[in-house]
Image: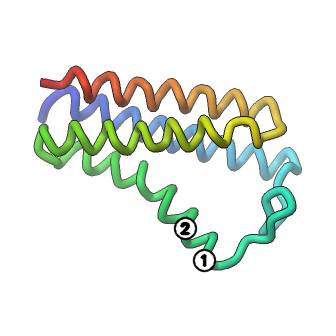
Amino acid sequence: MDKTQIILSGTWVSLMLIYLLGDVLRIFSGDYKTGEMGKIQFTQGMWLGISVLMLLPILMVFLSLVLDQPVNRWANIIVAVFFFLFNLVGLPTYPSAYDKFLLAVSLVFNGLTVWYAWRWV
């Protein structure tokens, strides 16, 4: 197994832990009301979409370890750039300082993922 595969898998694990920490803090701080985000009442379809979205980084942990180098490299770059842009757009919508901080840290991990994947030859 290539060292870069392990590093890339580690960046995805770190990203998921950051997301999880943000969710836990949001619940404990009272920023989260059951079934709502802001004034939006979530439907089952929306929850399904969110679960698919959040499954991507979890799958990338595994795929970073098993895919062949050319496919692995581009999968990491594409998914990391997607999450970078997704979180960058969403960053202003979070009112809490801890959320903004954790999203900024997640942007760094997305950048590291792209950097390691891009340099992988």
Cα distance between the residues tagged 2 and 1: 6 Å
Looking at the picture, does residue 97 appear above or below residue 26? above
Q: Secondary structure at mark 2?
A: helix
* Residue ranking furthest to the bottom: 44
Residue found at x 82% / y 36%: 96
Query: Can you give x and y, in whole percent of width and height, for residue 9 in the image?
Result: 32, 38
Residue found at x 73% / y 71%: 42
40 displayed left or right of 67: right
In which quarter of the view is residue 33 placed?
Answer: bottom right
Looking at the picture, does residue 7 appear above or below residue 46? above
Of residues 7 and 114, the one nearer the viewer is 114
Identity, as a three-letter code, of the amino acid under mark 2: Gly
Q: Residues within 10 Å of mark 2 (few under 14, many from 20)?
A: few
116 displayed left or right of 11: left
Q: Secondary structure at mark 1?
A: helix
Query: Can you give x and y, in whole percent of width and height, for residue 27 in the image?
Result: 79, 52
Query: Can you give x and y, in whole percent of width and height, for residue 44 in the image?
Result: 64, 79
Q: Residues within 10 Å of mark 1 (few under 14, many from 20)?
A: few
Looking at the picture, does residue 112 appear above or below residue 53? above
Of residues 68 and 2, the one nearer the viewer is 68
Looking at the picture, does residue 11 appear above or below residue 57? above
Residue found at x 85% / y 45%: 29
The answer to the question of whether label 2 and label 1 lie on touching residues, with beta carbons closer than 8 A, is yes
Residue 45: mark in rendering: 1
**Residue behind mark 2:** 49
**Could you tell me which quadrant the N terminus lies in?**
top left
Identity, as a three-letter code, of the amino acid under mark 1: Gly
**Could you tell me which quadrant the C terminus lies in?**
top left
Q: How many marks?
A: 2
Query: How is the structure coloured here?
Result: rainbow
91 displayed left or right of 83: right
Residue found at x 53% / y 29%: 107
